[in-house]
Image: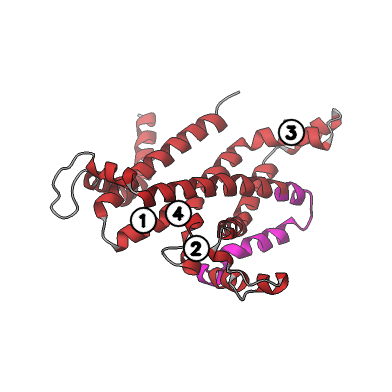
Amino acid sequence: MRKRKEWRSFALFLLPGFAGVCALVLVPFADVTRRSFVTAVTEQYVGLSNYRRVFANEAFRLAVKNTVRFTAVSLPLLLALGLLLAMLLSGLKEAQLWKSVFLLPMAMPAATAAIVWRMAFAKGGFLNLVLGTSIDFMETGWSFWVLVFSYVWKNLGYTVILWLAGIHAVPADTVEAARADGAGTVRLWRSIILPQTRGSFFTIAVLSFLNTFKAFREAYLVAGPYPQESIYLLSHLFNNWFASLDVDKMAAAAVCMAGVLLLFILLFSALCLRED
């Protein structure tokens, strides 16, 4: 009877959240999945025709290539830089002050950041004044690295905070015991601290991975819906398909994208959270 009451309380506790997920996520996604197999106007069943149209679309292939490249470059850079800064800050007494400084970019509106990038990298911007050139960096291949810099700058703060939380969660007695056994700084971090932050690493990596798909706002505000080819991402493609009401292609692409994201997260969790 006691266990039954505990399970009932547990179910009642989860019910509001689960109902919200069903109403706002699962049911809409089920409708998107249904729409990926029908035409947008007549809702006639067309099987995999929408998926074939998506994969044959040149803009889709370009957006996928650019998104994969952007993720492959910016994600490891963000994780490594965040860990390095967290390691440096973990031993400082002023760590709390630096936390506030690193979180400032998250408080800056996307429109403000876009104006700063435009002033810095436009043809008559600050960078050209320093270099003595007249290059519109957002219209060249350099725009990709501008977007990478923007993403790392925007997300570095919370990455450092999460790394610090994981580092400070390592039991102090374990660290002291390792030091007493003669472990140096490098050995301490490699064998004691970092292995115990795998849970934090998983959380940081997944959040940062998902945020790579949110780097659209700055690029859109700086360069518009059709930016330079190297920064034309999946988010641009979805925005343009939405504007032209290509619902059938957008639904098929959304299902494919959700499947890839889910597969990545499952594989990554299996690698990071597996028992030794």
Task: Provide the secondary structure element on which disc 1 rests.
Answer: helix
Q: Is residue 136 visible?
A: yes
CA separation in Å, label 4 and label 3: 37 Å
Q: Amino acid at mark 4?
A: Leu
Q: Which residues are magenta?
A: 85-113
Mark closer to the chain start, 1 or 2: 2
Q: Which residue is mark 3?
A: 190
Q: Are marks 4 and 3 in contact (CB under 8 Å)?
A: no
Residue 2 horizontal/vertical position (percent):
38, 31
The residue under the point 21% across, 43% down is: 37
Q: Which residue is mark 1?
A: 238
Task: Provide the secondary structure element on which disc 3 rests.
Answer: helix
User: Main SS of the magenta segment?
Assistant: helix
Q: Could you classify mark 1 by the number of other residues whose Cα lies within 10 Å: few (under 14), some (14-19), or many (20 or more)?
A: many
Instruction: Please identify the residue farthest to the top as the structure is shown.
Output: 276
Task: Provide the secondary structure element on which disc 2 rests.
Answer: helix
Q: Nearer the viewer, mark 3 or mark 1?
A: 1
Mark closer to the chain start, 2 or 3: 3
Q: Which residue is mark 2?
A: 219
Q: Amino acid at mark 1?
A: Phe
Q: Which residue is mark 4?
A: 233
Task: Please determine whether, in this image, residue 123 is positioned above or below residue 77.
Answer: below
Residue 155 horizontal/vertical position (percent):
58, 56
Residue 161 horizontal/vertical position (percent):
64, 52
Q: Amino acid at mark 3?
A: Arg
Q: Could you classify mark 4 by the number of other residues whose Cα lies within 10 Å: few (under 14), some (14-19), or many (20 or more)?
A: many
Q: Are marks 3 and 1 in contact (CB under 8 Å)?
A: no
Mark closer to the chain start, 3 or 1: 3
